[in-house]
Amino acid sequence: MKELRGSLESSTTNASPLIQCYPARPPALGGMGLLIFPGGGYGGLSDYEGEGYARYLAERGVTCFVVQYRLGTDGFHHPAMLEDALAALATVRRNAVALNVNSGLIGVMGSSAGGHLAAHAMVAHEGYRSSVSLRPDFGVLCYPVISMDDEIGHRGSRDMLLGPGPGDALIRECSCELHVTPRTPPCFLWHTREDEMVPFRNSTRFADALHAAGVPFELHVFDKGPHGMGHDLSHPWAAICHHWLSGIAAG
């Protein structure tokens, strides 16, 4: 398995994430590349939400890149995680030819807290300078943490990302639904209604913001299932997501 080190020209935190590469097996979906941010509450990285997704999608024509971003358990806080995500995107885009991906068809995918990081990359990229575009071309969010507020946010993820006792301004800065614009890329979201850890309203709130901004999206809220259902690749979410990705690749 090939590995890269990411870099970001305008990083303020010395971003250099490890990126693990999983080349697509033919037929490729138009050279699609997908950066995957595993879940884990910003305190760990789930294997099945990283390598598990990557192997599944690589076998179906998507070149995947699993990003080992920094964590709160190691003493890191925002913006380290966001800069790791953007560094990974910049690095893959700069090396698109060598990696056999289409530089204009690179997306982000994440689950739970990794879903927050993917969404954050989708809405906060314009604050950074780079020689290549830091705007993802699409996003896939699996039962994501979206908001940092007390109503529907996940307290553990917030503490790991922002540290204890963050102020209102920092909470707003990292609540992704508040920063959607018409330039936010298209998005696929899925969640389960029974998710008690990260309420499904995180996904519906982000979808509402996308709708208000005129951004294309697809949202699926399945009735049954606890948090973390992404490990079940026989669940309909996986085939539906791949179908959506195929549509993105086809334009």
Image (cartoon, rainbow, N blue to C red):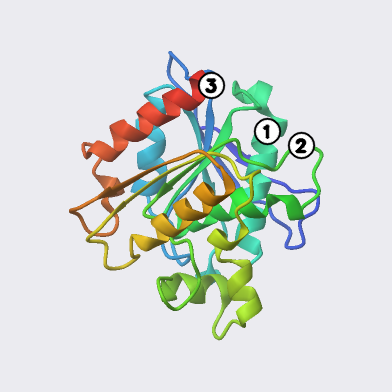
Give the residue pinned by disc 2. 132
Secondary structure at badge 2 equals loop
Give the residue pinned by disc 1. 93
Which-is-in-front pick, marks 3 and 1?
Answer: 3
Provide residue 243's location: percent of width, then percent of height.
Answer: 36, 27
Q: In the displayed structure, would residue 124 be above or below residue 104?
A: below
Identity of the residue furthest to the left in this view: 224
Secondary structure at badge 3 equals loop
User: Counting other residues with Cα less than 10 Å from the Cα at mark 1, is it few (<14), some (14-19), or many (20 or more)?
Assistant: many
The residue at 22%/59% (across/down) is: 226
The tag on residue 251 is 3
Circles 2 and 1 in contact, beta carbons < 8 Å: yes
- Closer to the N terminus: mark 2 or mark 1? 1
Amino acid bearing label 3: Gly
User: Counting other residues with Cα less than 10 Å from the Cα at mark 3, is it few (<14), some (14-19), or many (20 or more)?
Assistant: few
Q: In the displayed structure, would residue 81 be above or below residue 56?
A: below
